[in-house]
Image: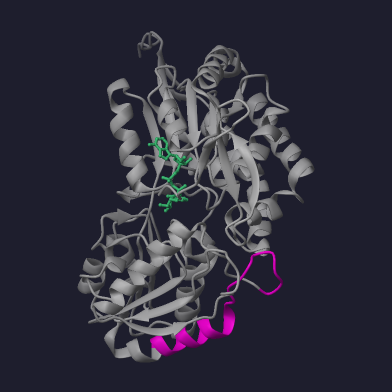
Amino acid sequence: MGQGVVIEKDNANGSNVIVNKNPATDEVISKVPCSSTAELDALLETAQTAQPAWALLDVAKRIQLLKDGMAELAKLHKEELPPLMTREMGKPLSEAQEEVDEALEKDEFLQLLQDSLQPKQHNSCLVVRQAVGVVVVLSPWNFPVDEILYLLLPALGSGNTAIVKPSEVTPETGAKVVSALASVLPPGVVQLAQGDGAVGAYLVSHPTVDMVCMTGSSATGKNILGSAAPSMKRFVLELGGKDPMVVLEDADLNKAAKDAATYSLSNTGQVCCSVERIYVAQSVYDPFCDLVTKYTRDNFKVGNGMDEGVNVGPLVSTMQRDIVAKQVDDAVQKGAKVLYKSPIPEEKPGSFYPVTVVADITKGMDIYTQETFGPVVALMPFDGTETEAIRLANDTEYGLSGAVYSQDVPKAQRIAAQIQAGQVGINCYALECMDVACPWVGFKSSGYNYHSGVEGFHNFSLPKSLVFVPPPEEED
Ligand code: NAD
């Protein structure tokens, strides 16, 4: 998405620096040096040299070292990370705290990873997992701790070495995650690069890199696929979404309305699997719109994420705020109705946008097709049939997540099964209820390969068959 982060020349030595700003106050937090191409070359050479010995370590030993690294992250930075995240990208402190707490709970995840890497015997053949080589991890700013870990831990656990380039929006948060892990791992196993998309692009097309793991927008993902194709690198790309929520006539409307608002607005709507399109059966559309409006009015307050009582922070940048404003204005011009717009701290310079409930969205509007990534609850009526629910939910280039609300669970499950998306909640928001063993998958433009769960872990290594001469068959 490129958040218009300013990269300027450092007058002292002529190198590039990221101007790291707080989106709630516009204050400069720090200036972070970008890695030069010579530095990137050196990081890659170190990673390549360190990789064979790391891959030769026993899997259990590698996983134990990763657990030690996570313990170090908790010890060094548990208190420090949430306020740093809030300052760098704006999310309310309570959400930042929640993210850090959840991110640090990786024991079960790492145990599953270890189990998934065990050899499998098939008669006289032994299938082992072999590391891919040198991996680049490129991460987004919206969950700046966990989105690194979901890619980095399986990459390292599988025997690869890694260079992590955090988002240019959250460079200091990313640096703390990498430095904690690096402090316990053998030298060169994990290293940090800093910079914007240009630094990412340099790494992606570098011949030393064997695999690119990236979480970010679909536009960047397509770009990366194009530029890395000639060198046939491996990929895990987790990309954008435009997730549907379907509310049928027989749904528990109170629960559905609460979830519609909560998961359209959490992280100021800047979640890959935010609820972005809410299709409501016509027969219950008006009461549902009323419930959503009331719940939103009563429960959300926009402001600086460091302030008490605020649960919706600023947008990550003025650029992102303007994208959201343009989509809402376009919708209104084409006939949508704004049911609610919250107050914002207007006297402050931050990139705030009101929490907005907008109804009667139709297909010709930008908000119907483009990822909004903002604090907007977008509602539209439909005829309430199963066929139309499926058609509308799939009416998008994306396929990340979705949700279906109905008290007729078999019916909801039938609809969910036909939604082209990696995870679909039935009477719940999928992300909230996911088990650690589930893979995280984007269909269509929402991803290329995937991570997590045994299926996802296997994308970070290659299966290799060791084939032995079968024993002679015993005669009867
Ligand atoms: P982005 O695409 O702008 O950037 C992601 C990362 O890629 C950053 O580190 C960036 O510097 C780097 N990058 C940018 N251009 C590059 C290029 N040409 N070559 C190599 N690297 C490049 O995304 P963002 O704005 O940081 O994050 C928001 C997006 O991420 C949203 O679209 C959101 O839906 C998506 N996202 C997806 C998931 C998921 O699990 N599917 C999770 C979180 C966020």
Does the segment drawn in magenta span residue 278? Answer: no
| Residue 371 image position (x, y, % from top left) | 35, 60
* Residue 459 visible somewhere in the drawing: no
Residue stretch in magenta: 288-309
Q: Is residue 314 above or below residue 284?
A: above
- In front of the other: 374 or 399: 374
Left or right of residue 328: residue 362: left
Labels in figure, total: 0
Instruction: State the quadrant of the C terminus.
Output: top left
- In front of the other: 135 or 284: 135
Q: Residue at x 30, y 79 (%)?
A: 332
| Residue 31 image position (x, y, % from top left) | 63, 40
Does the segment drawn in magenta span residue 289? Answer: yes
Q: Is residue 283 above or below residue 15?
A: below
Q: Residue at x 37, y 39 (%)?
A: 449
Q: Which of the 4 image quarters holds residue 46?
A: top right
| Residue 286 image position (x, y, % from top left) | 35, 90
The colour scheme used here is one colour
Direction front: furthest residue:
11
Q: Residue at x 35, y 72 (%)?
A: 328
- In front of the other: 351 or 73: 351
| Residue 4 image position (x, y, % from top left) | 45, 49
